Amino acid sequence: MTKTRLEAFSDGVLAIILTIMVLELQLPKSASLDSLAPLLPLLAAYLLSFVFIGIYWTNHHHMFHVVKKVNGAVLWANLHLLFWLSLVPFATGWIAEQGCQRLPVVFYGGILLGAAVAYFVLVRTIFALEGPKSELAAALGNDFKGKISVVIYAVAIGMAWVQPLVSYGCYVAVALMWLVPDRRIERHLGKGGARGR
């Protein structure tokens, strides 16, 4: 089974997710700077969520650059990831409306945690298909960034019950950690693996 349709479908779903998020942005009531003030929470939430979707798209692209084939299990694992990412617009709108209320911040973190776990499951499903000596396994190694992201999300969800602003800081920290595309695959390709693919 080829990976082309999986990549095209994933790209389409992610594009729709970004479109839904941008459609949620409201226009200012007037042409003054003061009219932007009430929209700042929505713009900040949109920016953070846009960055997260961009991070997943970029790393998904890099990952499937070295994947040779897919099977039904990989397709379902990929759909599992897309399910969590499809909830980002809803969670973004909720935190934008409610600000630092505990439950929306917990829900947002739960979506991010679900997506991180789903990405981990997708990677492991590909490892199971291609074997422990696959190019992806060689490129990702022990995936410290992926594991620490899950831990930070879990901490952020717990902290939301005490101080939601700390949770926002955790979410931003994970985004900053991943903002630069994952170079492990590019470095692996530069060392002779899967050139020209």
Image: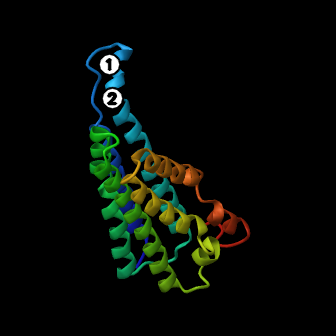
Q: Position of residue 145 (x, y in %)?
A: 58, 64
Q: Mark 2 points at which residue?
A: 39
Q: Position of residue 99 (x, y in %)?
A: 33, 40
Q: In which quarter of the image is residue 133?
A: bottom right
Compared with 38, 52 (above or below) is below
Residue drawn at 29 percent across, 22 percent down: 28
In the rendered image, the quadrant that contains the N terminus is: bottom left
Residue drawn at 42 percent across, 69 percent down: 117
User: Quick one: SS at disc 2?
Assistant: helix
Residue drawn at 28 percent across, 15 percent down: 30
Q: Is 147 left or right of 34, judged from the image as shown?
A: right
Compared with 82, 121 (above or below) is below
Residue 20 in view, yes or no: no
Q: Where is residue 103 in the image (x, y as percent from the top left)?
A: 29, 52
Dot 2, crowdedness within 10 Å: few (<14), some or many (≥20)? some
Disc sitting over residue 162 in the figure: none
Q: Are marks 2 and 1 in contact (CB under 8 Å)?
A: yes
Q: Mark 1 points at which residue?
A: 35
Q: By what rule are the colours in the image chosen?
A: rainbow
